[in-house]
Amino acid sequence: MNRRALLAGNWKMHMNIAQAVELAQAVAKAGSGCTDRDVMLAPPFTALASVAQALQGSNVLLASQNVAWEAQGAFTGEIAPPMLTDIGVRMAIIGHSERRQIFLEDDAMINRRLRAALAFGLTPVLCIGETLRERESGATFRVLEQQLRGALQEVSADRAEQIVLAYEPVWAIGTGKTATTAQAQEAHAFLRGLLADMFNKKVAETIRILYGGSVKPDNIDELMAQADIDGALVGGAALKIESFERIIRFQ
Ligand code: PGA
């Protein structure tokens, strides 16, 4: 099965509008020659509309870093799916470990966000991953299974096929500590098997599974060489064009 690679930059809470537009234009230029892979950017909410304009005519996909589960209403501080599609956002990161750990989002909430995204035509980039304590106590696969099943409750196989999954071990995010390629491949293969079990083989083989956690120019090639790693979700190294361009151009 040939899955199209996806290289995604998550800018988190960085960049004002001018900086965001400048970096987005540089990424669009860097990605313009790449026809065999997808590039995605997730700027902060305040820069989305300006970046959407800056990306017009390019093939870079625009994502939000989260999405509400209702179309409108009294949800102070949240952004609804139609507000995002309205300005050209195509994808939404959901369940990032920072949302889970700092803002206490749980699997039920993440499931609601994911189903709303699908219903409004946004491609969810669902993030899951174990903490260091969970890994060290041998609970990694159990935690991944719980998060995946929780997030995909009441999602049909047809719909599930449209999501992107990101395996991001919490202990590797922003720490400079990357999972070894063997650890990452092992988790990805486990997740693909689980998807086959939860849905069917076609869904399992269609869904792109990204690795995230201290992805850098010097480890991207080895990660991308693994059978079940279909791309990367990049934080720190996506904030500079030099490093993100090298990641986009993985060999
Ligand atoms: P990092 O972040 O690349 O800075 O480790 C990855 C992420 O949180 O998606």
Image: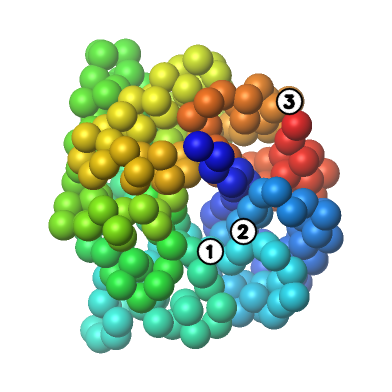
Pointer 1 local density, CA inside 10 Å: few below 14, some 14–19, many at least 20: many
Q: Does residue 159 appear in the picture of this structure?
A: yes
Image vertical order of residue 60 relative to residue 169, above or below:
below
Q: CA distance from mark 1 to mark 2?
A: 6 Å
- Give the residue number, with chain letter if any, for mark 1: 63
Residue type of the residue flagged with mark 1: Ala
| Residue 205: x %, y % from top left | 41, 39
User: Looking at the image, is mark 1 or mark 2 earlier in the sequence?
Assistant: 2
Q: Residue at x 50, y 37 (%)?
A: 1
Which three-letter amino acid code belongs to the residue tagged 3?
Asp
Question: In the rendering, at what x and y percent does residue 152 appear?
Answer: 23, 51
Q: CA distance from mark 3 to mark 2?
A: 21 Å
Residue depicted at x 77% and y 62%:
28
Give residue 130's position: percent from left, percent from top.
33, 29
**Do the residues under discs 3 and 1 have CB atoms within 8 angstroms?**
no
Mark 1 and ligand 1: say if the CB distance to the nearest ligand atom is below 8 Å.
no
Please indicate, yes or no, whether residue 128 appears anywhere in the rendered image: no
N-term mark: 3 or 1: 1
Dot 1 lies on which element? strand
Report which residue position mark 2 lands on. 41
Residue under label 3, please give it. Answer: 218
Pointer 3 with pointer 2, Cβ within 8 A = no
Judged from the image, the secondary structure of the residue bearing numbered disc 3 is loop
Residue nearer the viewer, 175 or 165 = 165
Mark 3 and mark 2 lie on one chain; the one further toward the N terminus is 2
Q: CA distance from mark 3 to mark 1?
A: 25 Å
- Quarter of the image where the C terminus is located: top right
Q: Is residue 86 above or below residue 234?
A: below
